[in-house]
Image: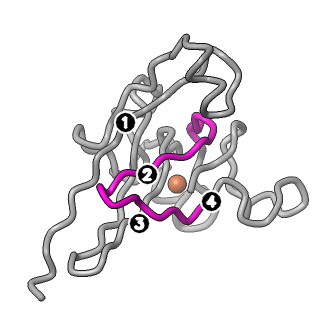
Amino acid sequence: MAGNADGFYDVQQPDVQPERNLRGLFTADEDGRFWFRSIVPRYYPIPDDGPVGALLAATARHPYRPAHMHFIVAAKGYRPVTTHLFVAGDPYIESDAVFGVKDTLVREFPLVDDPARAAEVGLPNPFQAVHFDVTLNSDGS
Ligand SMILES: [Fe+2]
């Protein structure tokens, strides 16, 4: 799940984005690999009205989250994990409003200039790509 290029989730723009926009359910292959096409997300502000806004103001903090994608990864026999993938170079990567960034979750999204690969994955050339491994722990069963 990710916000759109303007930094909004589908539920924040029900009259603009289709329901479940930029969300997906993927099944990995027998080697645990999966891939998908998406956009490179953009930073966005958390709602800063009400008590959250008061807390941010009292602590002199901005409301922005750095660009990220959410993941819930699960497999039979393993403990599920809920995590993020953050975009390296985001202007808020060092000051996430909700303190969710860990160095191990930050990835570069390098430009790929490969017309054959672009055609293979159905994207215009050049495009950006990212590799993100998720390791699950056994559930002990
Ligand atoms: Fe988010």
Pointer 4 residue Cβ closer than 8 Å to ligand 1 = no
Q: For marks 4 and 3, give the CA distance.
A: 11 Å
Q: Nearer the viewer, mark 3 or mark 2?
A: 2
**Is residue 34 on the magenta stretch?**
yes
Whether the residues at callouts 4 and 3 have beta carbons within 8 Å, the answer is no
Q: Is residue 132 above or below residue 55?
A: above
**According to the image, label 2 marks what residue?**
34
Q: Nearer the viewer, mark 2 or mark 1?
A: 2
110 left or right of 75?
Answer: right
Residue 72: mark: 3
Tell me the quarter of the image containing the N terminus. Answer: bottom right
Q: For marks 2 and 1, give the CA distance.
A: 10 Å
**Is residue 56 on the magenta stretch?**
no
Give the image quarter of residue 140.
bottom left
Q: At 31% from the left edge and 74% from the top edge, which residue is drawn?
A: 75
Check disc 3 and report its element: helix, strand or loop: strand
**According to the image, label 1 marks what residue?**
131
Q: Residue furthest right?
A: 15
Q: Nearer the viewer, mark 1 or mark 3?
A: 1
- The amino acid type found where label 3 is placed reads Ile
Magenta span: 23-43
- The amino acid type found where label 2 is placed reads Phe
Residue 94 position in % (x across, y down) = 34, 33
Residue 71: mark: none
- The amino acid type found where label 1 is placed reads His
Q: Residues within 10 Å of mark 1 (few under 14, many from 20)?
A: few
Q: For marks 4 and 1, give the CA distance.
A: 18 Å
Q: For marks 3 and 2, give the CA distance.
A: 13 Å
**According to the image, label 4 marks what residue?**
23
Give 103 or 108, whichever is nearer the viewer: 108
Q: Magenta residues: mostly which secondary structure?
A: loop
Pointer 2 residue Cβ closer than 8 Å to ligand 1 = no
